Structures are given as C-alpha cells and as structure tokens.
Image (cartoon, grey):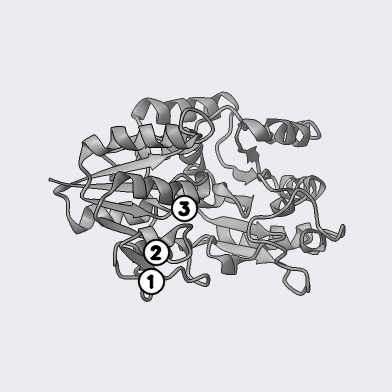
Amino acid sequence: MERILIIQTAFLGDAILTLPMLQKLREQKNERSIDVICIPSTYEVFEHSPSVDNTIVLYKRGEHKSLFGLYKFAKQLKKNNYSKIISPHRSFRSSLLTALLKVKDTVGFDNASLKFIYRKTIHYKIKDHEVQRNLKLIEAETEGENWKILPRIKIKEEQKNSIDSALSELSIKKFIAIAPGSVWQTKQYPRELFIEVIKLLRGKGDNIVLIGGKDDEELCGSITSGFNSGVFSFAGKLSIVESIELLKRADGLICNDSAPTHMAMCADIPVLTIYCSTVPEFGFYPYNTKSDWLSYSELDCKPCGIHGYDKCPIGTFECAHKIVPQKVISAIEELIN
C-alpha cells in the first residue's frame, strides 16, 4: 500500500485548512495510508480527521528541537517506508526533515525554505485561498467553486452529549458565539468594542457564548464580568473538537482573523471575520455559504504584516477602531436572519 506523509507543523488555523487537501487526497485513492506530522497543539485536529490514518507529533520545542533530535526523529520515521512526502508547511525545519527522510517523491511550495530539496515545487500564489494553495500540492481541481471543500472533523457521541448538557445546565438554547482572542494583538478587535457589540446584541435579546483557549480565559472572563446575564464564557473549558461541536449549535460566530474562523468552517455555520491589521486577500477568509468579513482598508499602513504585531506599529490602531460596533451588528444580522 502506498504510504504518504504530510508535514504540517503550523498553528491551529493552518492545520484546519489542511484538512480539505487530506479529504481530497483520500478521495483520489482510498487504498493508501496517510500520515500527518504536526505539533502538540494541533494533534487533536488530525487525530479527529476521518482522512488521516496516523498522527505523529513533532516536539519542535522539546526533544526534536536540536538537529540531532530531528535526525533521530527522521531515523525512526524512515521505518515507515513512505513513498511520498507533501509539505504544506514552508519552514526550514519541515524542509530539513523532508531531506533527512530521503524519499524520492517530494512536493512543496516554491517559497519554502530549502525549496531545492523538493522534487516538485508548486507556485505559492498569494491571492489564492490557503485551501486552494494546498489543493494544488496534490494537483486537485481549484477552478471556480471546486476548491470550497469544508474541513471535516469526527467527534464521539459522549462529547456531543457533554456539550448539550453544558448548554442545558445554563439554560442556553439559542446563542451567538464570539471568539474575541488572537495570538497577535493587532489582529484582535479591541475588547471595549467587543463589549459594545455584545451590549447591542443583548439589547436585542440574544444570548452570547464566548469561546477560546486557555490563553483567552482572562480576556473572556473580563468581558463576561460586565454582564449580569445572557453572556457566558466557555474559554479554556473545551477541547478544539468540543469547541467546533459547540459552534454547530450557534446561530453564528463573530471572530478575528484567527483559528475560530476555520473552526466555524468545520461547523458550517455563518461566520463574520473582523480584519484589523490583516486583509482577506492573504487567503484565510471564511468561504462557506453564509459567511462574510469586515475590513477597513482605506489606510496606507494596512496591511502592516501577514501575521500581525504585539501592538500597532504607528500607535493608532485605526484599522480596528474604524470598524464600529454597529457595522458588526448589521453584518452579523444580515448573515443569521
């Protein structure tokens, strides 16, 4: 049986956007084994993908950090006798690992570090969506709407039931989800503006559920503390797949240009993504039927970077403050009504 290795050691959002490629790869030929190398924080995503046979963790901040550690990791992987390596991740470490495995059939992007080690390189078209770019690595159809494949995650029944129980205990039936956090501060819609958005939604009778990881607990807690009722935080309480399952029960999601956008794709619910310092043209926008984004682009300084910064480089953060809460309300209401 053909055995393929996918190297994707990027963060959560990128991991989710790799799933459509894996699904298509499985569809192209079911009689093959597909393994994925990922980092600890995204293990859950690939472990719950119906298209992945084996998920292998690369501890790039631990035992595999050094060159010797990576060499030992590659030596162990060689026993799997991979016939092909596909690397959506473009880092030096991913390329070096590919080289160490000495597999003849290798595919990567033409802007990857050490791109010369790949037998075949695919042009990384910046204006394409990330899903389109990944699909081109396996020569799948990307014209028209064909690339809009929703990422799939499988979840156990007991996990579904636990989500239902948690919502029932809080008497939450209908709600709008909000994910206010982001790794990068300049990609994060300001806390005070999110609070204004929630006040407007509460005024219309909507319940609000905040989601996020452990790092978002403090932010979400500070938001919920300002409301007597109708605003709940699940930040830090759910796993990734449990958060996706929670989103399936939401009327819609409001979030930053961050991983929850792509989690909403898994849930296939309306999502409104707010772009502060970044832009949709980077290729990480929501693409299911009832989704949209807000971005104030009439600024010479925007975008200031593809990822974002800890603070606005020029100290104004106009890209966020120009997106007023009422615009957010109008946009989400159009999506969910």
Circle 2 sits in a helix, a strand or a loop, which is it?
loop
Q: Residue at x 56, y 47 (%)?
A: 260
**1 and 2 marks in contact (CB < 8 Å):** yes
Circle 3 sits in a helix, a strand or a loop, which is it?
helix
Q: Residue at x 52, y 70 (%)?
A: 126
Relative to 87, say whether 166 is above or below.
above
Q: Quadrant of the C terminus?
A: bottom right
Who comes first in sequence, dot 3 or dot 2? Answer: 2
**3 and 1 marks in contact (CB < 8 Å):** no
Q: Residue at x 76, y 75 (%)?
A: 298
Q: CA distance from mark 3 to mark 1?
A: 15 Å
| Residue highlighted by disc 1 | 145
Decide if residue 145 is in sight here. yes
Q: CA distance from mark 3 to mark 2?
A: 10 Å
Q: Which numbered circle lies on residue 265?
A: 3
User: At which x and y percent is residue 313?
Assistant: 81, 58
| Neighbour tally class for label 2: few under 14, some 14-19, many 20 plus, Cα within 10 Å | some
Q: Amino acid at mark 1?
A: Glu
| Neighbour tally class for label 3: few under 14, some 14-19, many 20 plus, Cα within 10 Å | many
| Residue highlighted by disc 2 | 148
Relative to 128, say whether 41 is above or below.
above
